[in-house]
Structures are given as C-alpha cells and as structure tokens.
Image (cartoon, grey):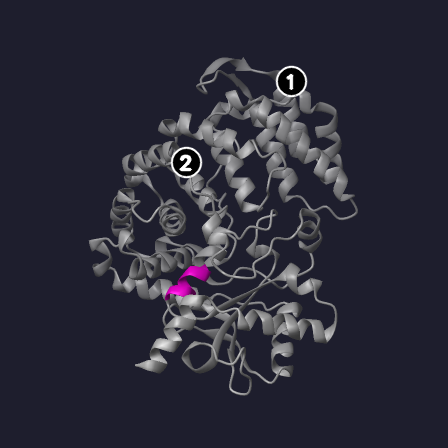
C-alpha cells in the first residue's frame, strides 16, 4: 500500500483538519464511472434476526444470554435521534453502556448524518468515544458487527483516530471469517478494497475460503463487489499472490449472465473487473471469453455515468490554457472507457527541455475529497483508476485538491502545474527517449 501511494510523484498528504475542511468544498466533484460511491446496504442489515435487541455474546460471537433490555432501549434511542447533535449527546451520556450492536448502530448513524451547525470538535469527540467503546466490546463482535463496521468506515472514508481499531477489527475478522455469510464476505472484501488496505494473510485466507464455499449463493451485488475488490487487491498484494477464489465467483457470474441482474453501479464495477483482466494475468479466467455481450453492456453503463467537474477542476483547466497549453476537458479514453478530466497537449510549451510521451500529452486528473480517505490516502477506487490509466500508457498527472488549495494566486498556480508536468515518472522519460532513438 505504501508503495502504491508513492507511485505517482507529488502526492503529498493533507492534514486531518484540512481534509475535514474540504469535505463540503467540492459539491460537484465525485467519483466517475465505476468509481462512483455506492450504497452497499441495499441488502445489508444492522443486525440479524433477534439480534436487534442486542444479545450478549462470548468471544466466539455465540449468544450466552437473552437480550439486554437496556441495550434494546439504547438502540431505539439511537434510531430515533433526529440529528447529529442529539446523537452526540446520547453517545456522550451513555457510551459506557453500549454493547457491540449499539456501537455499530451509532457509528453508522453518526458517520452518515449531516453536521450543519455543529462544531466539528463535538463530532470528533463522539467518534473517539465510539472508537473506545468498539475496542471495549471487540470480543463480543460477531461476524455481522465486524462486517458492518468495516463497511461503514470504508463507505464514509473515515480514518479512525485510534490506530489500533482497524487492526483489532482485522483480528476479529480472522477469528470469525469462517462464520461469515455471503453478504458479509462481499461487504468485507469491498471495505478492504475501498480503504486501499491489503487484508492480513489470515483474514484473506478466511474470506477466500468463505467466498469459494458461498459463491453459489452470491447475488448480483455480492458478485460485483467481490470481483471489483479483486481488482484492487491485485495492486496491493505481492506480485506472486494468486486469487483462486476469483474463478469460483466468476462461475457465479456466468450463472447470472444477464445484464438485467445488475444495476448500473454494479455494471460499472464489472467493467473495471473485465478491464483489469485484460492487463493483469492473475485475474484472467477462461469464462470471460464467452461473456462479450455482458462486457459490452458493462462498458455502455460505464461510459454513460455522469461526470460533474467541480469549479476547482475548471480552474485547473483554465490555468493550463493560460500557460499556452491546449486542453481538452472530460476526454473518454478509447481503451478503458474512463473519462479523463483533462488531456493536455504541449504543442506550444516544452517542459524541462523535452515533451511528455506521445508528442506532448498528459492526462491530468483533479482529485477532490471523494478520491481520498480522511487520512489523505487514496481510496481503492482512486488507486484503481490511476493504475488502469498508467498501464494503458497515459502520462498521468494527479492534482490533489489540498495541494491546489495551497496555491495562492495565478502565478503560484501556474508554477505548481509546471512542476507537476515536468515531474514525469522516470520510466516514461526513458520510453520516450527509446522511441526517439529507434
């Protein structure tokens, strides 16, 4: 993961406060194509069956007593909280009484609640209290609690302040992976991939085993989530890592081989999987050859996804034009189907005494807050798009929003972009020189 974050030069990290301040700054900016943030909870439940009342559980997640009436009441109070202020007050007053179900319910509601008019420090304190409650009750987390909390952390791009929380959840995942149902397997794979986090070896073995055992029961969403996650893991895992479970999930995809089974977001995920198979041999499975109709449908859905350039992205484009460069906005990559924010032609400007590859072309991506976790690390979707464009031969230049915001005035913005364009990856410079020689 660390290597992936440093693959593209100039990708500095913002402070936590800067990331929080930017969350509402780019209302038009969002993930494009198959990267669009999805609602993964279509079939997910906060609790299963009678567990809604908050059963006490032992360290193996087994019920040991009946439901706690107090925890039932707390869960009801969490559910009826009207806003973040009420929820934060409830957490502050009663978190010491929370069981694992209460913790997950409160995390989900608070991370997804609107926070207008509420001081950020109040929410941060409540989240830290919930993190402490999660660690206190971690031994009672069952498979569903673990899968749900990892899912909501990933979906909201939250980065826990307590660095031990995710490792503790990972340890619990390893312990319980053999009890996961299909939804929990798929959501957990998706969560790790979205966080750009490689699962530990024990977790991966457990999830792989369950995926192979349960693939025949996967619904369309489970299939799309799992195969998309495999694409990201192929970037994060060691080069000799293998993914035999992908073939099993692919067999389920074959049995579901009707585009009507999938919604548009799932079709976009599958398009990215098919694209990864074309450039990553570890993901290639024989069944793909007979799925051309579905592949075509997935590409149509991927290319049909709406793009919403932010004001800051447009400012980057205008600055490049002012520098004498020719700029095309929202250009569709013919090989991948991705919409590239800007294709920049260096026809009137040479950088550092030479031009970019292929006659002076750069693919410039303005990456707003939705491309990053709260920590500033790129999401799995961001890493995947960068990798796809990179291996397809684009000279990719990423412009993180916090770096752009630090530029004061037109001159500073122009110098920033000049430095970015000049800092092409070394192997691309060498490839360009080789073409010149031969």
* Chain part drawn in magenta: 385-391
Kindly identify which residue carries mark 2.
Answer: 200
What mark, if any, has residue 70 been given in the picture? 1
The question of residue 274 being in magenta is answered with no
The residue shown at (37%, 46%) is: 237
The question of residue 390 being in magenta is answered with yes
Is residue 120 shown above or below 146? below
The residue shown at (28%, 42%) is: 245
Which residue ends up furthest to the top in the rendered image? 65
By secondary structure, the bulk of the magenta-drawn segment is best described as helix
Q: Is residue 82 among what the camera can see? A: no
Q: Is residue 296 among what the camera can see? A: yes
The residue shown at (43%, 42%) is: 198
Residue 313 image offset from top left, x and y in percent:
62, 69
Quadrant of the rendered structure where residue 182 is? top left
Residue 161 image offset from top left, x and y in percent:
63, 37
Please state if 74 lies on the left or on the right of 34 as rendered: right
């Amino acid at each position: 993961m660390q290597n992936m974050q440093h693959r593209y030069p100039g990708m500095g990290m913002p402070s936590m406060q800067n990331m929080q301040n930017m969350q509402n700054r780019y209302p038009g900016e969002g993930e494009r194509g198959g990267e669009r943030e999805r609602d993964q909870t279509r079939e997910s439940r906060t609790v299963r069956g009678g567990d809604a009342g908050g059963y006490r559980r032992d360290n193996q997640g087994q019920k040991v007593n009946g439901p706690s009436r107090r925890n039932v009441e707390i869960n009801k109070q969490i559910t009826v909280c009207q806003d973040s202020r009420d929820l934060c007050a409830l957490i502050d007053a009663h978190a010491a009484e929370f069981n694992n179900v209460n913790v997950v319910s409160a995390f989900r509601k608070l991370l997804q609640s609107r926070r207008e008019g509420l001081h950020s420090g109040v929410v941060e304190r409540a989240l830290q209290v919930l993190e402490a409650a999660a660690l206190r009750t971690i031994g009672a987390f069952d498979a569903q609690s673990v899968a749900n909390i990892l899912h909501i952390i990933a979906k909201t791009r939250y980065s826990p302040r307590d660095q031990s929380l995710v490792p503790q959840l990972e340890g619990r995942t390893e312990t319980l992976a053999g009890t996961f149902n299909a939804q929990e397997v798929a959501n957990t794979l998706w969560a790790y991939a979205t966080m750009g986090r490689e699962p530990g070896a024990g977790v991966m073995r457990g999830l792989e085993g369950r995926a192979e055992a349960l693939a025949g029961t996967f619904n369309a969403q489970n299939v799309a989530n799992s195969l998309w996650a495999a694409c990201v893991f192929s970037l994060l895992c060691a080069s000799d890592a293998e993914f035999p479970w992908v073939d099993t999930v692919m067999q389920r995809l074959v049995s579901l081989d009707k585009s009507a089974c999938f919604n548009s977001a799932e079709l976009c995920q599958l398009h990215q999987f098919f694209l990864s198979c074309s450039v990553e041999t570890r993901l290639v499975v024989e069944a793909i050859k007979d799925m051309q109709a579905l592949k075509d449908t997935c590409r149509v859905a991927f290319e049909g996804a709406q793009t919403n350039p932010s004001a800051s992205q447009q400012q980057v484009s205008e600055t490049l034009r002012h520098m004498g460069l020719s700029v095309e906005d929202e250009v569709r990559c013919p090989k991948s189907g991705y919409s590239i924010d800007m294709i920049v032609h260096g026809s009137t400007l040479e950088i550092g005494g030479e031009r970019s590859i292929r006659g002076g072309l750069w693919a410039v991506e303005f990456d707003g807050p939705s491309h990053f976790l709260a920590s500033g690390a790129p999401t799995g979707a961001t890493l995947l798009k960068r990798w796809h464009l990179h291996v397809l031969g684009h000279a990719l230049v990423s412009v993180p929003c916090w770096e752009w915001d630090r530029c004061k005035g037109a001159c500073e913005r122009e110098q920033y972009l000049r430095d970015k364009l000049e800092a092409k990856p070394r192997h691309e410079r060498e490839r360009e020189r080789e073409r010149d020689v031969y």
